[in-house]
Amino acid sequence: MTMSLTYETRVEASELIPINLNQLDVKTNLSTEHDSHFIPARTNCVGDCKSLKPCSLKSYCNCGGDPPRSIKSACSKIQRQIDSTNVFETLKFAKLIGDNNLLQKSQNYLKSGGQERRSGVGSSSSLGNELVAKSISCTPVINATDEFFKFGKISTQLISTPNVTLPRTGYHSSEVLFTFGGISEDDQLDDYLIVEFYDNKTNRWIRIDQYEEPRAYNGTIAMGYEVALIGGCYCGAADSLEYLNSCKAFDTISKTWRDLAQLEVHRGFVSAALLGKYIYALGGVGVNKHVLKSVEQYDIEQNQWTTVTPMNVKRAQACATALKDKLFVMGGWNEQDWLSSVESYDASTNQWTVLCPMQQVRAGASCVTYHNQVHVIGGYNGEEVASSGEKYEPESDTWIKIPDMFEPLSEFSMTVFQDKIFCVGGEKCEENVYFLTDDVICFDALTHQWKKMMRMSVPRHALSACVVKFPCLNGCESS
């Protein structure tokens, strides 16, 4: 079943990084394949043509007349009337009919920051330019555009999801942001694993519903084109979590799964990080519901887990990252206390070192390595959820405060995407009321500011996110 789709763009369009959709292989059961474009079926045709079979938008209508000339005339007038009320619709219209002049004018308007917010697309009446909406010659194209916007939660039953997206100029590889699993408020969605990726050209999230066992509080690490999901909790029943030792790999190209070697110990609420060619699973909660301080190392090439030196402190709902050949783990809960302690692991010596503690106790926080510093944000201190963040300077072994998020947040996921810190989902707290969120926000180190991005399709917490890097397919320039 298709559902109505509503966009809400909450970031300046000039900061959206374009991806070439011409390279995406996207089809629906309402379309034919044509130049790798998304081409909806013609549902209404002017003139005597009564056929409802799909046709290429670029061939316009087969019922006679000369629509291209009329559309071309309308486009020349539209170019002079582009404003914030019609730029997105005009952009889509220009792409569908292949008018490069109108397309360039629309893109230039967006780059100038002229459009900052868009909400509610759907019927042909939403096409902001009256010259398009009232033109009989444009009717078949408008109807097709309608169908394009009517797709809501995109599922594999309707659309085969795009294989790869391309980077902005100046990036050596294409980065694609994926989210996995978590716990939502919709029981039906907890029957299977939710996977989404972010299309940053159209500024929307695309669902890839996967009929794998649902999991939350797991580790997620990118391994080339694959993403490894490590341990965590089976979250099919909200009142009963099962701690997992299973590990899965998701192929982002083929959208298929394979089993990885199992952890030696069941680990729910686990932390995970990649250091060199090894993945590390740290702490968590075992089958006896006790918090662990043991650590396992996964050899990606050998598909094998090995136990290494345990941490100094047992931790669950901690966070971990790698920086300068060392593994860092911080915060969490040890069954008695919420933690601010931090320690690092040197794989060459198989030893842990205690470091300067964070400025604030944090469990259910997230951390990343960003601009050669460890950044940790949000979390819970046993009394309240934090909106604060801090970064670690390894040379001086000190923590420095960074700007607060918009709202307190815990049990979200964080990753670096296109040189910004992205925080996705999680659990908010407002006036002692907790609720799940589908919010996505990002932090830019250059401006030291947070910005709101396009929301995910499903509010959820205890999810995981990571970025997969594809090779540059379109001649990217060196950065």
Image: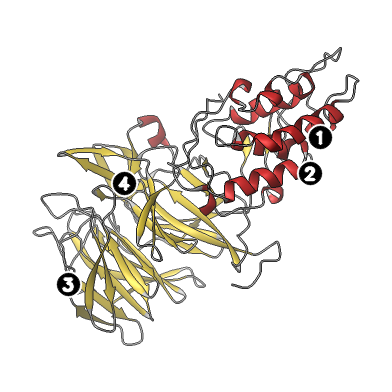
Q: What is the crowding at mark 1: few (fewer than 14 residues within 10 Å), some, or many (at least 20)?
A: some
CA separation, marks 2 and 1?
10 Å
Sequence-wise, which precedes: disc 2 or disc 1?
2
Location of the N terminus by quadrant is top right
Would you place residue 276 above or below residue 203 in this image? Answer: below
Q: Are marks 2 and 1 in contact (CB under 8 Å)?
A: yes
Residue type at mark 2 is: Asp
Residue 387 in the image, given as x and y percentages of width and height: 23, 53
Q: Which residue is mark 4?
A: 426
Locate residue 318, reporting x and y percent.
Answer: 25, 61
**In this view of the protein, can residue 309 be seen by the observer?**
no
For marks 1 and 4 on the same chain, the one whose residue lies earlier in the sequence: 1
From the image, tell me which residue sits under label 3. 357
Residue wearing tag 1? 58
- Residue at 63%, 73% (x, y): give it: 478
| Place of residue 23 in the rendered image (x, y in percent of width and height, measured from the top left) | 70, 51
- Asked whether residue 99 is in view, the answer is yes
2 or 1: mark nearer the eye:
1
Give above or below for 351 relative to 71. Answer: below
- Left or right position of 25 against 202: right
The mark closer to the camera, 1 or 3, is 1
Instruction: Select label 1 or label 4 by which is in front.
Output: 1
Q: Which residue is mark 2?
A: 35
Rounded to the nearest whole Å, what is the CA distance between mark 1 and mark 3? 62 Å
Mark pair 1, 4: CA separation: 43 Å
Residue sitting at x 32%, y 50%: 412
Image coordinates for residue 299, horizontal then vertical, percent: 45, 72
Distance between the Cα atoms at labels 3 and 4?
Answer: 24 Å
Q: Earlier in the sequence, mark 2 or mark 4?
A: 2
Q: Amino acid at mark 3?
A: Pro
